[in-house]
Amino acid sequence: MKLATGLLAFCLALSASPLPAEEHVDLDMVTRIRQEGFRNSNVMQLASELLDGIGPRLTGSTNLKLAEEWARQRFAAWGLANAHLESWGPFGRGWEYEKSSLRMIAPDHAELLALPEAWTPGTGGPIRGPAVSVRASSKEDLEKYRGKVAGRIVFFGEVPETRPHEKAESQRYDEKSLSELFEYEIPGGPPRYDREAFRKRRELRRIAGKFFADEKALAVVTPSRRDGAVLAVQSAGGWKKDEEPASLPGLVMSLDHFGRIARLLERNVAVDLELDVAARFLDSDPMQSNVVAEIPGTDKRGEVVMLGAHFDSWHAGTGATDNGAGSVVMMEVMRILKALGTPPRRTIRIALWSGEEQGLLGSKAYVAEHFATRPEPTDPEQKKLPEWLRKPTFPITTKPEHAKLSAYFNVDNGSGKIRGIYTEENAAVVPIFESWMAPLKDLGVTTVTMRDTGGTDHESFDAVGLPGFQFIQDELEYETRTHHTNLDTYERLQRQDLMQAAVVVACFAWEAATRPDMLPRKPLPRERSAGRGASEKQAAEPAR
């Protein structure tokens, strides 16, 4: 009897305690968004105009400026308000190349698959020279090659061992992998990305580049980090005005062709090459831009929900999965919401970022201009590092707009469909997002995880205490084939997945813009005492 009485008292107390209010979901608008997004989709048309018609969009290049004006015009044609290019910088110098060819002319004739790294000079016309193999893991190792590389094309690096691919190149989340992603990772485990190893590789490459230039080599060729005909090509650095530019043409070569040259040289077979790279630096305008437009709100128009994706890319492909996909998805979201003709309560704003591939530069500049600033680092060693490798500085100084941003949503993990969302350890948004996802579960959207994720522009917002979120997407072949490679083209896009992603994001944007209150926030990041671990969460990997 005493046990039953206690249980009754507990139940009465529980019923009297305040419970979270049920999150209202606008199912009528969900239906309308799904109808417009699946039956009148423009996402693949936008993708072709951007990727086929304009092409790769390296920050500082002519193509990126063309793409930005194209997007601005699209926004204006759809009736979005305040469609404009918002300048930031200075970034430094731009770069682009017109052609590149590398041929073996002895002991055999063969076209070799290679592409120039960004921000390396051209050859000034065809040049010929013998190949030389250089394998060095330290400054001391390089000294063995003094006097041996002049007038030669350097093949720098080991030949990675290649093995048959034993699993599918394209991967989607299944129930098991999504359940694993749901489980929270307690901080303090092994880092997802070895920053110190990256720093050491970067420093060795800088030292080696200067050594080869001083020794009068003709060019430097390195192996792709992907096998087959996949060229993973990024930058040799040198876009900053105060940074020493690369002195020699640098190229990345397919493993198959690099291996052939390396094995011939190991057998002391002379290899002669002909190289022709036409590249140029763009020094006239050090400033860059983000593309911004919005759908004005009604009674809460001073509060803002932001959507974003990075517009810039690398130059080997056409920047399709990284991140043309995310860009056209976010553009399609704005088109859908505007086409429905019902204004949201809060303003919905889109931003297409530049400079992401160099360290989230465009979104960081926007956040600093509108929301919050951090002091510049005073440590000279920190100043030498790329933006994403630096330790965070304090204090954070917020601006009035900081209090008016409800949320920022980002898409930047390829062409795969959305399967859920990372909450960046914000527990208060979990039941809210779960409610929004309920009418989307038939589209495969099922997972809300407390985990954080790195390498995308949402970090610029999260780092200053703003609710910034990245969606969980099916990987497909993003990491295995397309990320920063020559295969990153329109053909790798998945039409149904992009349509699904646009519908999902549009529903999230609408709910965030119309709910009674802004989304809850985490505490503002703060500097921790020495010996208490990292000062705050860092990006898990370099920019995607």
Image: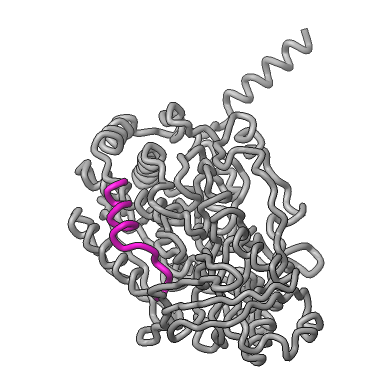
In magenta stretch: residue 58: yes
User: Where residue 397 sits: x, y (%)?
Assistant: 53, 72
Q: Is residue 283 above or below residue 46?
A: below
Give the magenta-colored segment's residue range: 44-60
Q: Is residue 219 above or below residue 65?
A: below
393 left or right, relative to 528: left
Can you tell which quarter of the image residue 182 is in?
top right
User: Where residue 381 sits: x, y (%)?
Assistant: 69, 82
- At 58% across and 23% down in the image, what residue appears? 15
In this orientation, which residue lies closer to the viewer: 413 or 56?
Answer: 56
In this orientation, which residue lies closer to the viewer: 171 or 222?
Answer: 222
Can you tell which quarter of the image residue 501 is in?
top left
- At 41% across and 52% down in the image, what residue appears? 326
Residue 299 seen: no
In this orientation, which residue lies closer to the viewer: 325 or 9?
Answer: 325
- At 40% across and 33% down in the image, what residue appears? 24
- Quadrant housing the N terminus: top right
User: Where residue 284 sits: x, y (%)?
Assistant: 35, 87
Q: Is residue 64 above or below residue 42?
A: below
